[in-house]
Image: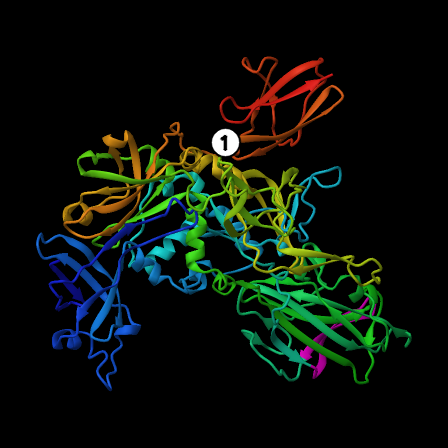
Amino acid sequence: MSIFLYINDQKLDTDVNTVISQNKQINDLNDLASRSANYTDQFSVPKTSKNIRALGYLTVPGNTSNIPYQKNECSLYSADTGECFVYKGWARITDGEKSFNIAVYDGGYDFFKNIENKNLSQLTLTDLLHPKTVATVVNTWANPELPYRYILADYNGDTGRTNIDSEITVPEINIDYLVPSVNVAWLWRKIFEEYNFGVQPTGAIFDTEAFKNLWMTYPKGLPATGDGVDNHVLLHSNDYSFVDQYLQRDTGRYFYHAHYNSVLVDELYQVDGINMTMRENATYQLEIKCTLFGFNNFGQQRDAAIAIGKNAGGRNPLASFTTHQLLQNGATIFGAEADVIPYGVETTLRSAPFQLNGLEAINIAVTGSAFSGSYQLAPIPQGFEVTLVRIDPLFVDFSIALSDFLIKDFISEIVHRFALTMFTKKVGNDIEFLTLHEQLQTPEIVNWSSKFSDKLTENYISGSYAQRNWLRYNYNDKEGSYNDGVITVDNVNLQDSKDSIKSKIYSPDKEGRIYLNESTNVYPVWEKEYNENPSPDEPVVTYKSLDKRYYFMRSRNAYGNAKIYSKKFEIENTVNNYYRETFYGLPFQDIVNDYYQPLQNILQKAVIVTAKLWFKDTDIAGFDFKKLYYIEQLSNYYLVNKIIEYIPGQLTKCELVKVQYASVLPPVEIPWFVINTIVVNGRRASIYFTRNVQLAGHLLISTDGVNFTAYGMLGNFNPYVTRDLDPGNYFFRIYDEHSNTVEVTIV
């Protein structure tokens, strides 16, 4: 066999008797989870001086060759026809005593070697880094092109008061227990940008809504904003005097500004002794520890009160509550406890978090209790200690959280979810992904009848399949299986059951909850712990962060007023649109129905033929697994599963899979509405549904399932409750052709 062999751009000597048998394969349809590469059987080249030199003097005593440990780029040509069998593949080289043993790999091998042992955290994920604040959460809804999004769902934390009722007219959503999700399409593109030399894969699936609107959650509960994060101390001082007394002569009441005599930590824009001026827009918190001694005009002991002025300069912060007193969400930042500070009793006040912008200032004033009546500080030492901190928001860093998710596992999740096969080109880094439907039902057909020689075997049990082949999620309930899917094979000679694909992704809980007045899935990243006998200062429920809880979900835009707030920051914002979760099309049985029908049809009457065919170098060098091959002698169309040990001038074995044509499948689309269930109570029907588009929704009703008439507008009601209906059978749907139909009986 005459060949030209190049390794690392060095042409190697080959023996005239060298035989290289080539194997061509991609996915093995006999094994649902397999992903394969082309390879040659091991062959030998002589240890000539040229070859030894080209391989870095490998096997020579004292050599330091790195050849056995590195990527060795290899190309393989036919010396007779000039056909290129392998271009820039991988060569593995070992010592064969009197020769070098070589095996060559190509066909996607390069890409998978590039991502070998790499995890998602090794991607450049700086575009996902963000502070977890109310403003950031809202911004992800205003900018849908961002690669991350806060999708409203129940993550098993403190959701807030999200359901409208007699007391709540606007939903109140607590962001502290939300987690962000990364767009799967963005993450997919990032992988190929960094590990496929910037060349993005092609495939019709990547333009579908099902792919573009797929999101993966941050895998663990993020601490409530600020918890577990060191608050940044800006100022701490316990050396105070009280100056700038303001006397209201009609009452004899004095106001005293606290004056910093020394500042131990100074990271403020300006400290003039009274005013603390901020450098940046941020959330701040004050702590005051004080022991105050005061008296009234009659020399009687008086309790004190403390007020905080905002942008008051040297003025009395209480001259105008609306102008000078620092308020947060309409209330004083210390609450009522600052109104009465007992005489001579050490008291600690810790404010609620408050917002200040850069160059805004605050000061502290002391006066009589309840801010009324005469008051003067006694001429004795007063105890006063102040700490001002900036509460830095928690920064969400996906590059840390994704460190346990291998890139190859993520690729497998997407490949399995859409039933994809990867096709590579010999030259360049172009990769194309086809669905099974594209590969098996709408391919180009080539007639191989002239190449057929002989049929060796015909097998009716397809590889490693069982009668029931399961695609399984992970579950928080380890006994769960409700979102699994199964590919069935009607062949009693197969083993009963097999887990073909076991996903790293978790399923949402089986039981949903009402959230924003609709049934929603629950994606636990928190575990609730109940305190049966809490003390007065203990919460009834605490939340423990779970870990490695990766969930897939879809996102849909919804409209309606809602208050978005953070308990930790005590900050809120009002929005009129947001994004909420939907799990439509993500149960594995839906995936089987949408993407695996062609494979299921093949497996029902599986025929795997091993045949001998005559091939030329041009057939092998330009072989295309995307095509179907017709063989007249066998009266069927076949998908080539493997080409086994091609040697020029000899018959070559091929493993052929008989193709059963399935009906042509329409593109997978997400319906506008899905009726989940209808509950009949007397003569009324309560219709629970999932809304995947933000339309008001027309409820349609029929008594025969054919002729539908408009019944009413859904509005923001979920469930929608009908008026009293006459006894009989009724069919309901929402928007003709844009939802499923559900039948109920009224008795």
Q: Is residue 419 above or below residue 281?
A: above
Q: Where is residue 299 in the image (x, y as percent from the top left)?
A: 90, 77
Number of dots carrying numbers: 1
Q: Position of residue 251 (x, y in %)?
A: 83, 67
Which residue occupies the foreground of this view, 276 or 242?
A: 276
From the image, tell me which residue sits under label 1.
Answer: 671
Q: Is residue 613 above or below residue 71?
A: above
Q: Where is residue 500 in the image (x, y as percent from the top left)?
A: 49, 47
Q: Which residue is found at the position 44% from the left and 38% from the top?
A: 596
Which quarter of the figure is the N terminus placed in? bottom left
Q: Is residue 553 above or below residue 719?
A: below
Which residue occupies the foreground of this view, 60 or 106?
A: 60
Q: In this view, does 341 lie above or below 598?
A: below
Element under disc 1: loop
Which residue occupies the foreground of this view, 175 or 588?
A: 588
Per the image, is 383 magenta? no
In which quadrant of the rendered view does residue 228 lie?
A: bottom right
Q: Which residue is found at the position 20% from the left and 58% from the top?
A: 20
Q: Is the magenta stretch mostly helix, strand or loop?
A: strand
Which residues make up the magenta segment?
238-259
Query: How many other residues sit within 10 Å of disc 1, few (<14), some (14-19) or many (≥20)?
Result: some
Which quarter of the figure is the C terminus placed in? top right
Which residue occupies the foreground of this view, 55 or 389?
A: 55
Is residue 587 visible in the rendered structure shown here? no
Q: Which residue is found at the position 45% from the left and 63% from the top?
A: 121
Per the image, is 253 magenta? yes
Q: Left or right of 122: which side holds 84?
A: left
| Image colouring | rainbow
Q: Which amino acid does label 1 sit on?
A: Pro
In which quadrant of the rendered view does residue 258 lie?
A: bottom right
